Structure formats: structure tokens, C-alpha cells
Image (tube, rainbow, N blue to C red):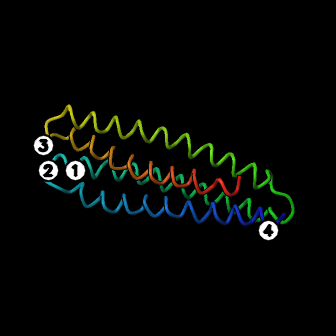
Amino acid sequence: MAEEKQGFFVWQHDALGWLLAWGAGSVIAGAGLATSRRADLRQIGLQAIVWGAIDAALALNGRRGARANQRHAPTSAPRSAKQEAARFQRIVAINAGLDLLYIAGGLRLAQTAQRSSSRYGTGLGIAIQGVFLLLYDSLLTWLVAKWS
């Protein structure tokens, strides 16, 4: 039983590493784009910085929780691995639904803006982040099923 608990929490920690990498990469790429002379590219960059920072913070917090649960797993985790996996699956499934809204909202904003405007870049930046998050959250929802 302890191995099962540790197994999920190790997997969760590693899976959140991909979100952390995306977040850090978004901040770095966004910083480069934010220096552009073009308003649309600057806004894509600013969106990447903000979304990347939030993604990285969420990933770090989630990884910290997974490590804490992993340490307690041999004795008694606050929740069973199965319960935690089901909770995690619910969260990422809800997030996948929200990601669809981010994509739709971003594309709508870009569609209604002039191509060279900052609103256009803001919309594209939101949509780009939403697409990654939709793929990531959908994949996690599917993969975590083996633990729940």
C-alpha cells in the first residue's frame, strides 16, 4: 500500500514538472518578445510572462504537496493515493474545460482587433497559452486514470 501511495505522488510530482518547464519557458520566451517594437508581439510576450509565472507557481506548489504526501505515504498520508488521484483528476478535467474558454476568448479578442494592435497580440497570447494548457490538462486527465 505504501508503494502505491508513493508511486502516485512521485508520478504527480514528475507530471507537474512539465507545467513548471512550460511556465519557465514561457517567461523566458515572453521576456524576449516583450522587447519587440511590434505591439502585437509585445502583448504576446507579456501574456507569456504572466501566464508562465502563474503556471510555474502552481507547478511548484503542487510539486511541494506531492513531495509532502510522498514523505507521509509510508506511514499514513492525509488522503489515500486513490482519493488524491481522483481529486487531481477532477481538478485537471475542470481546468481542461476552462482552457477551452481561454482559447475561445483569446481567439475572439484577436478576431475583433486590428491585426497590428496590442489587443490582437493579447488575444493570440491567451489562445497560445490556452492551447498548451488544454493539451496538458487533457493528457493528465487521461493518464491519472490509472491511479484513481
Label 4 near label 3: C-beta < 8 Å?
no
Q: Is residue 125 above or below residue 25?
A: above
* Percent of width and height locating residue 140: 56, 54
- Secondary structure under tag 1 reads helix
Q: CA distance from mark 4 to mark 2?
A: 53 Å
**Amino acid type indicated by mark 2:** Arg
Q: CA distance from mark 3 to mark 2?
A: 8 Å
Mark 4 vs 1, N-terminal side: 4
User: Which mark is nearer the camera, 4 or 1?
Assistant: 4
Residue of label 4: 3
Label 1 near label 2: C-beta < 8 Å?
yes
- Secondary structure under tag 3 reads loop
- Secondary structure under tag 2 reads loop
- Label 4 CA crowd tier, 10 Å (few <14, some 14–19, many 20+): few
Left/right placement of residue 22 relative to residue 10 reads left
- Secondary structure under tag 4 reads helix
**Amino acid type indicated by mark 1:** Arg
Q: Dividing the picture into quarters, in which one does residue 117 lie?
A: top left
Residue of label 1: 42
Mark 4 vs 2, N-terminal side: 4
